[in-house]
């Protein structure tokens, strides 16, 4: 079954956009101007947060996306924090939530998001761009491209696969993060690119498939960190 909408970096290739139409009725090409620095200006996970029940959008999230949500009857809330140009104010919404846990760096989370995590265990991680760096593929199974996150989760006995950020492409930087290359929908993980082009790709796919999920490559290029793939 197709999703109503999928939100993805406007700088993705046409091959990716074409493949997404097989899984979603509409593709929203996300972009902002003069809000934050260039490499993440078109990344949905900088302006959107999604947990099990709620969407929380930054106040300076594109109006066009809010209008699409309104038209589709998608419930959302507006956060307290405006995304800006510094590290400290560009990661308010870049957190990860599961049914039982909430992950982010202490002191970097939008207050409205934190207020919705009262019934979850909060786990503070050393990386403020948490959603960029971390993917949940099961109740207690995770994939990360951040060594600090990997060590923290292993100490807490989470099943965790480390995926090197080398060869993950991103605008203006040497490499990107694993979480920003993908999104989960309908028991499938959709990658902006082909993970098998990466040296750790076979192990990554085996780990994902061992947890009952299917890997979908949206192009045959190297993985691209576009701030995630958000299905609505």
Image: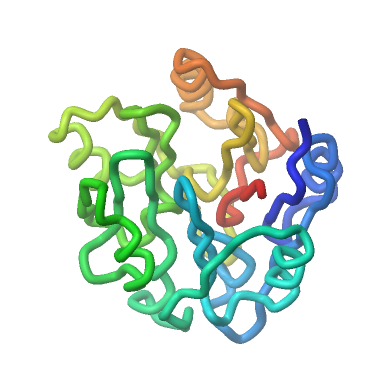
The residue positioned 62% from the left and 50% from the top of the image is 230
How many marks the image carries: the answer is: 0
Q: Is residue 197 above or below residue 55?
A: above
On the image, the x and y values in percent for residue 170 come to 57, 57
Instruction: State which quadrant residue 221 falls in.
Output: top right
Is 68 positioned to the left or the right of 125 in the image? right
Residue in the foreground of this view, choosing between 224 and 107: 107
Indicate the position of residue 156 as horizontal and vertical percent values.
Answer: 15, 34
| Residue 9, position as x, y percentages in the image | 68, 59
Q: Residue lying at the far bottom in this picture: please name it.
A: 34
Quadrant of the rendered image containing residue 100? top left
- Image coordinates of residue 118 in percent, x first then y, are 25, 56
Say which of 143 and 100 sits in front.
100
> Which image quarter is the N terminus in?
top right
Residue drawn at the location 38% of the way across and 60% of the way down: 129
**Whether residue 17 is situated above or below residue 184 in the rendered picture:** below
Viewer-proximal residue, 187 or 72? Answer: 72
Residue drawn at the location 46% of the way across and 13% of the way down = 210
């Amino acid at each position: 079954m197709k999703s109503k909408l999928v939100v993805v970096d406007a700088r993705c290739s046409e091959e990716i956009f074409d493949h997404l139409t097989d899984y979603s009725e509409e593709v929203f090409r996300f972009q902002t101007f003069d809000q934050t620095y260039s490499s993440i200006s078109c990344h949905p996970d900088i302006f959107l947060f999604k947990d099990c029940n709620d969407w929380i959008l930054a106040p300076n999230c594109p109006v066009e996306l809010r209008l699409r949500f309104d038209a589709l009857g998608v419930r959302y809330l507006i956060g307290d924090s405006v995304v800006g140009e510094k590290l400290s104010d560009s990661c308010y919404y870049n957190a990860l939530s599961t049914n039982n846990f909430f992950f982010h760096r202490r002191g970097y989370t939008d207050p409205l998001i934190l207020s919705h995590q009262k019934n979850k265990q909060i786990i503070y991680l050393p990386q403020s761009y948490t959603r960029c760096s971390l993917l949940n593929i099961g109740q207690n199974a995770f994939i990360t491209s951040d060594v600090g996150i990997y060590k923290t989760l292993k100490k807490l006995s989470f099943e965790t696969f480390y995926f090197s950020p080398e060869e993950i492409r991103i605008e203006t930087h040497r490499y990107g993060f694993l979480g920003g290359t993908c999104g989960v929908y309908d028991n499938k993980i959709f990658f902006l690119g082909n993970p098998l082009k990466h040296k750790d790709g076979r192990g990554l796919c085996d780990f994902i498939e061992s947890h009952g999920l299917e890997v979908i490559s949206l192009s045959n290029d190297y993985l691209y960190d576009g701030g995630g793939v958000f299905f609505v």
